[in-house]
Image (cartoon, rainbow, N blue to C red):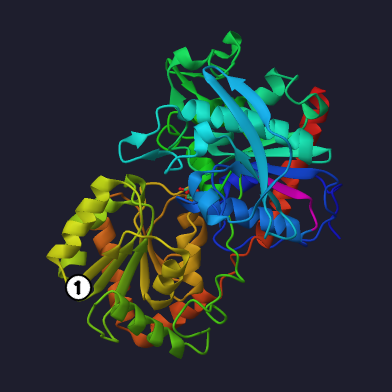
Amino acid sequence: MVTLDRPVQQQGDLVAVAPRAPLRRPSAKRPPMRRAIVHLTAEYHGYARTGGLAEAVAGLANSQARAGERVYAFLPLYASVRSATPRLQLLAAPHRLTLGPLEEEVRFYRDATRVGAPVVIFVDAPGCFDRPGLYGDVRGDYPDNHLRFALFARAALHGIAQFVPPPVLLHAHDWHAALAPVYLRTHPDIAPEFHDAPTVVSVHNAGYQGHFGAEVMADLALPPELWHLDRLEWYGRLNLLKGGLSFCDAAVTVSPAHAAELRTPEGGFGLHDAFRHLGDRLVGICNGIEQHLWDPASDDQIAAPFAVGDIGGKAVCKEALQRAFALPRRATVPLLAMSSRLAAQKGFDLVLHSECLRTADLQLIIIGEGDARIRDAVAALVAAHAGHMACSFTFTDRLEHQLMAGADMVLMPSLYEPCGLTQMHASRYGAPVIGRRVGGIADTVIDEETGFLFDPFDVRAMDAAIARALSRYADGARWHAMMGRAMSRDFGWDRSMFDYANVYRRAVLRAAAAR
Ligand code: GLC
């Protein structure tokens, strides 16, 4: 049996090697830590979502809870959460918090209909979060995002002190929560009970770091000595993600290949020195998906069930999808799908300029929400190719399930992809991925075996990969063999639990040594 005393695994190997198959662990089972794992996150599946962050954090928290850990998650009580969660239960009397110009009555709530673990706690600060968007509106990001998320981080620390029996380990996700480890260490008075608790920062998307002007330091109650190259200063700006990385005991990004990319000038988003500086404290661990929710054999959101060896239902799903998107109901035309945040990161520039997508005999469906400029360009492309392409700019879980079930192939031409979850959903639903060999796509798709990968970020390279996929599709037997291999891959969270336990263990040791 694997115990917590097992020698620490060589983290360097994890980063250097991009495993093409799920790592085989001696056993995913290990005794739970006797420490609460507290996730701080801006998104959580079922409540607030703009992209993969929500699903990744909730999936990780759920699998930790299933493994017997005490797991908590704190997230802001956005207006959308409030309206979608009819039975909010107030946890304690309001707490007055001031931060720079902000004076907020902070309340903590639980969803009264939710039973069992993880315990999800909402931070209610109406001046900050009672707004239509999570991060912004049609005019762009909210100008006070630094204050909103700084307040979230501080309030969450108060909430932990009130509601989470010690000892705790703090796991902050992305820049929105990155100030939590900073405050914990620099303001011991906020949470004296656990100011030396181990902290872990997860980097889901270093393309977003929380850059602000130097002048907001004082408003965020950040001591002037933190304005330093080794702390939060970054090319004359304040960088909140960098702050979290400089104070955390361990950092995780969401695939081994991306951990290597982050250490390079090309792939480090200007933070490669900070990532390198972390040494073996930065580890890449592949996200998983909740395989019981992403199982075409038992999925009640799709038109018909199917499985490896019993694939008939997939044709029913394809027809239903074509009908829903008013595309000709042709059984044999290859149906390509794209499901993604409408963001430049996802490679829409390639899609918009692809010759192959416009001229080959195929159908293309794009779903996603996000950038208005991309939305308009996609809408124009689709309008010019009616009967051949279709789109929806209202993303729902249900639609994504139906898309994966009905599609023959899924397109992921990402500029960068820390992990990506869509390729795992697609594989399980028998839709091989045509994707760029970056980050988590490189780690989870095997070229010519379970999908088609390309390297340069250009239209010709993508079109060549699409052409390879189309010609394989025309060869029925080989295509079915590829579908079977893709569907049989294990993308469950269990395969990552061992690595997380190691990271937590190292964080605990480091925090104890600092004490
Ligand atoms: C971000 C990344 C994506 C990753 C997700 C969850 O959305 O862009 O690659 O899968 O976070 O970690």
- Residue 96 as seen in the image, left or right of residue 50: right
Report the front residue among 134 and 306: 134
What residue does disc 1 label?
388
Q: Is residue 72 magenta?
A: yes
Taking the view exactly as shown, the residue that stands out farthest to the left is: 384
Which residue lies at the image location 34% right of the left edge and 56% below the top edge? 413
Q: Nearer the viewer, residue 394 or 272?
A: 394
Q: Is residue 259 above or below residue 460?
A: above
Is residue 481 found left or right of 459 in the rendered image?
Answer: right
- Looking at the rendering, which quadrant does residue 39 occupy? top right
Stretch in magenta: 68-73
Which residue occupies the foreground of this view, 354 or 315? 315
Residue 367 drawn at (x, y percent): 34, 62
Residue in the foreground of this view, choosing between 28 and 365: 365
Tell me where residue 231 appears, x and y as whole percent.
57, 19
Q: Position of residue 125 (x, y in %)?
A: 57, 34
Q: Is residue 421 above or below residue 244?
A: below
Residue 490 shown in magenta: no
Would you say the beta carbon of the disc 1 residue lies within 8 angstroms of ligand 1?
A: no
Q: Secondary structure at mark 1?
A: loop
Q: What's the amino acid at mark 1?
A: His
